[in-house]
Amino acid sequence: MKPTVLTVILNWRTPDMTLRAVAAAEVAMAGIDGAIAVVDNDSGDGSFETLSEAFRGHDRVRVVQAGRNGGFGAGNNVGIRLGLPDGSRPTYTYVLNSDAFPEPEAIRILMAHLERHPRAGLAGSLIFGTDGETHRTSFRFPSIASEFEGTARFGPISRLLSRWIVALPEPEQSGPVDWVAGASLLIRDDVLRTIGLFDERFFLYFEETDLCHRAKEAGWDTHYVRESRVLHIGSVSTGMKEWNRTPQYWFDSHWRYFCKRGGRVHAVAATVANVAGGLIYRMRLLVQPTGRRDAPRHLRDMVSHAVRNVGSAIEPSDQAFEPAIKRQAAA
């Protein structure tokens, strides 16, 4: 039976960019059975109307309204739950950012890779920027050690903790990694049936990390596929490069991820490691003031967030996100 693909593109106040992403996805979907679902995350700026008009009568592209801005995972889940236009489930779901543009063979290469590796449940592309430089999009799972190393940004510490550095050097060959960026991510439907969809309790950040971790726990590998190439502009919707202050949802997602991995004590330890590394870096800035700086009040906001949340544990169960896809499959 020929495999099918559902491409899901989430829009939030970037209709022109989304139109460009859909156009690139249509080229990459040529000859592949399936459809494209464009989900507007309650933009409230006319995006939904613009996109709906652009694809009116289009038999391969559907535009739907999420009805609320629940974040990256919740918005993509709306598209995933839709399935294909005939109501069936696709063989694969392809999640594509609205500011990401796959090369013509990018999706086909990801599909072929998963077909060749039956225990690989997810596959991510090589991502490059407008300057042609490859972005780091293959990673190790975050840990307490990586929290300290990542914020200390100090050569001797990084060398000592090299086994735990989250961002991997560009892999020379396609193959398994812990997790990949969600800008271009192909997922087996069997994986989603087994572990559920994105955890909607992550508004933004850590949601694809969590998905890959849950897949790993269920016996599925995640692969980085360097032959599949996607141009990514980056941070268009989130404005991360221009943050004046780290948003609350980043701290929420960070806390939730570590709580899910090891409970409240684990999340506290990760926060302490992060802050300790950050203090070391700030001491270095006193003598080397040209280093990259975090958003203002980042460490204080992180500590205050942990203090407010230390009394509440995050349940590790993802049962709330499994039935939606299973109900549809059984219907």
Image (spheres, rainbow, N blue to C red):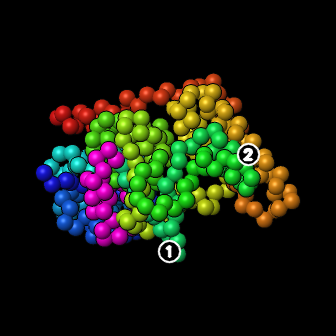
Q: Amino acid at mark 1?
A: Gly
Observer-nearest of 238 and 28: 28
Secondary structure beneath disc 1? Answer: loop
Q: Residues within 10 Å of mark 2 (few under 14, many from 20)?
A: many
Q: Amino acid at mark 2?
A: Gly
The residue drawn where x is 24% and y is 33% is 327
The residue drawn where x is 46% and y is 54% is 181
- Asked if labels 1 and 2 touch by Cβ distance under 8 angstroms, the answer is no
Residue 122 placement (x, y as % from top left): 36, 49
Residue 244, quarter of picture: bottom right
94 relative to 164, above or below: below
Is 30 placed left or right of 73 in the picture?
A: left
Residue 254 placement (x, y as % from top left): 58, 41
38 relative to 17, above or below: above
**Mark 1 — residue?**
132
Is 19 placed left or right of 274 in the picture?
A: left
The residue drawn where x is 19% and y is 66% is 31
The residue drawn where x is 56% and y is 54% is 167
Is 173 placed left or right of 312 in the picture?
A: left
**Mark 2 — residue?**
277
The disc placed on residue 215 is none
Q: Report whether residue 52 is seen.
A: no
Residue 311 placement (x, y as % from top left): 63, 24
The residue range painted magenta reads 94-120
Q: Considering only order in the chain, which callout, 1 or 2, is on the residue closer to the N terminus?
A: 1
Observer-nearest of 311 and 148: 148
